[in-house]
Amino acid sequence: MVNNNVVRLISPRNVAKTDGTWSQGVRKNNFIFISGQVPLDFEGNIIGKSNFELQAKQALDNFISVLDELGGKQENIMMITVFLTNMKYRPLFAKIRENYFKKNPPASTVVEVTRLFMEEILIEINGIAFL
């Protein structure tokens, strides 16, 4: 049975395309689930190789692009999970994040991982929004 209330977003306008086996985001009624966003531009190029600040901003911009495309706004974000390849980046990410979420910041988890899907990538962000 197909549920017409589910929207699976595979290729948002401003974010690198997936291989088609997963969605960048899924909307079910008032819930939006956003897959891990990384610092790739629309063409799949890494933004800010070895520059954490540029990578963090690109990953957040991609996250917000997926959210926008599914009908959400930044104030709808309830939770983000941030994966860092080194916890030394956490204070810088906190400052960058503050510029994106000035009012009512979402709940957040920050996790250090050994490696992300491409060696040069330093950050990945996923999350949940509620409309």
Image (tube, rainbow, N blue to C red):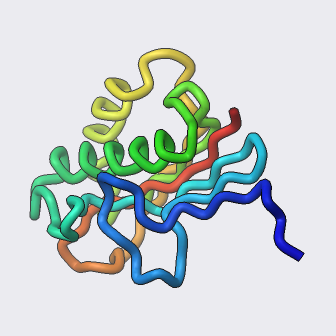
- Residue 29 left/right relative to 130: right
Q: Is residue 35 visible?
A: no
Q: Is residue 6 above or below residue 21?
A: above
In front of the other: 48 or 8 = 8
Residue drawn at point x = 34 percent, y = 79 percent: 117
Q: Position of residue 116 (x, y in %)?
A: 35, 75
Residue drawn at point x = 53 percent, y = 61 percent: 9
- Residue 102 location, quadrant: top left
Q: Position of residue 55 (x, y in %)?
A: 21, 53
- Residue 86 left/right relative to 30: left
Q: Position of residue 113 (x, y in %)?
A: 41, 70
In front of the other: 81 or 65 = 65
Q: Position of residue 106 (x, y in %)?
A: 57, 33
Please identify the residue farthest to the right as the structure is shown.
Answer: 1
- The number of discs equals 0
- Residue 30 location, quadrant: top right
Residue drawn at point x = 47 percent, y = 81 percent: 20
- Residue 85 location, quadrant: bottom left
Q: Is residue 34 visible?
A: yes
Q: Quadrant of the N terminus?
A: bottom right
In front of the other: 90 or 79 = 79
